[in-house]
Image (tube, helix red, strand yellow):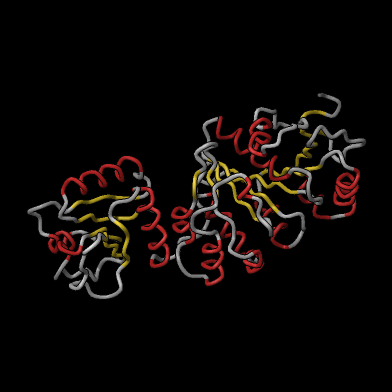
């Protein structure tokens, strides 16, 4: 779904610049129309239907804007909005265009009709999980994401741990993923549009991600149905979706398992992690349902006796004080399952 966006300002240079960037870099998001000097804004609105408008107060003063779903006004110091009715969205005029786009998408998601079902073009979903904590699950997930980036894929990393470790790897300044959880709980708004508005991209790795929840309880409000909507929405904005899960095996985790195309079941060299792995694979009926799409990841150079599957992925132990160095080093490894006995 593209947003039909109208841009109308009295600053021709600014208008040309922002419309050019939006048309070039965000062609999959916006149909951009521009009201230039000498054109009638009211006639343009009457002749064409617009979903959103990016405006300055002066050109819009006295114009009937009621047909436009989202009105965003560019704000500067000493700017007066006295002639504008209602409670318009205000954003600073002179800032990065990517930030302006995020503001438009975030606000439009709240007023647009929901379109949260599955997309025909859906990312491949990889879930990363372990019954034991501390085995390097997040590192494995990010290493795999980084490998996919190197292959030219657009990758979204979704951390659904109760206590997110994302700030160790990515900048955590931005809109929290809690806003997505709140929209899912209310059942109103366009989750896909909101996700496109708040997702961030790490400049070092190229991985797209979300800022952590505001409160660890926020994830607990999600139902299995919410998880389905969330995964579908995330899978609509990338080529590959990597989902990092907590070490519990609750309803939300099992729902992600059912939606995933591939599952990485991570263990390491410790006895505790291997014991828990054996318990899950031998005593839990969930494993039998997901076995055909599950790969055991032997992380940190783990050597497994009698692995619970016929093949597994082996990853070396990387000694480095920087966690980013660790996952980037692992990203060069082979992530295809190897027959048992091959190193």
42 vs 185, left or right, is: left
Instruction: Count numbered badges in the picture.
Output: 0
x, y (%) of residue 157?
A: 59, 46
**Who is closer to the viewer here, 131 or 89?**
89
x, y (%) of residue 75?
A: 27, 61
x, y (%) of residue 282?
A: 89, 49
Residue at 64% across, 40% down? 142
Residue at the outermost left position: 38
Residue at 86% across, 26% down? 341
* Residue 160, quarter of the rendered image: bottom right
**Who is closer to the viewer here, 74 or 189?**
74
Q: Is residue 82 above or below residue 1?
A: below
128 vs 97, left or right, is: right
Residue at the outermost bottom position: 86
* Residue 322, quarter of the rendered image: top right
Residue at 19% across, 64% down? 57
210 vs 62, left or right, is: right
x, y (%) of residue 202?
A: 52, 42
Q: Quadrant of the C terminus?
A: top right
């Amino acid at each position: 779904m593209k947003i039909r966006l109208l841009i109308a300002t009295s600053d021709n240079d600014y208008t040309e610049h922002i419309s050019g960037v939006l048309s070039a870099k965000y062609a999959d998001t916006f149909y951009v129309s521009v009201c230039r000097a000498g054109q009638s804004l009211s006639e343009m609105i009457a002749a064409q239907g617009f979903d959103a408008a990016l405006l300055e107060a002066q050109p819009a003063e006295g114009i009937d804007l009621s047909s436009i779903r989202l009105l965003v006004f560019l704000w500067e110091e000493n700017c007066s909005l006295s002639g504008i009715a209602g409670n318009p969205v205000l954003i600073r005029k002179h800032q990065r265009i990517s930030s302006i786009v995020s503001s438009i998408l975030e606000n439009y998601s709240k007023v647009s009709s929901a379109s949260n079902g599955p997309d025909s073009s859906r990312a491949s979903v990889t879930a990363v999980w372990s019954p034991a904590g501390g085995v390097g699950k997040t590192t494995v997930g990010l290493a795999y994401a980084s490998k996919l980036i190197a292959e030219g894929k657009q990758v979204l990393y979704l951390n659904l741990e109760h206590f997110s470790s994302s700030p160790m790897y990515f900048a955590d300044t931005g809109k929290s993923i809690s806003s997505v959880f709140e929209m899912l709980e209310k059942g109103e708004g366009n989750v896909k549009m909101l996700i496109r508005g708040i997702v961030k991209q790490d400049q070092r790795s190229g991985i797209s991600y979300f800022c952590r929840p505001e409160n660890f309880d926020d994830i607990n409000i999600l139902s299995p149905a919410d998880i389905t909507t969330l995964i579908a929405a995330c899978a609509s904005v990338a080529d590959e979706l990597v989902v990092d899960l907590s070490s519990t095996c609750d309803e939300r985790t099992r729902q992600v398992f059912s939606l995933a195309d591939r599952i990485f079941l991570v263990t390491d060299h410790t006895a505790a992690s291997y014991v828990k792995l054996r318990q899950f694979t031998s005593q839990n009926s969930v494993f039998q349902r997901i076995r055909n799409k599950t790969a055991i990841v032997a992380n940190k150079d783990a050597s497994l006796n009698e692995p619970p599957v016929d093949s597994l992925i082996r990853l070396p132990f990387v000694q480095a004080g920087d966690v980013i160095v660790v996952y980037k080093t692992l990203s060069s490894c082979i992530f295809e399952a190897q027959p048992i006995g091959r190193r």
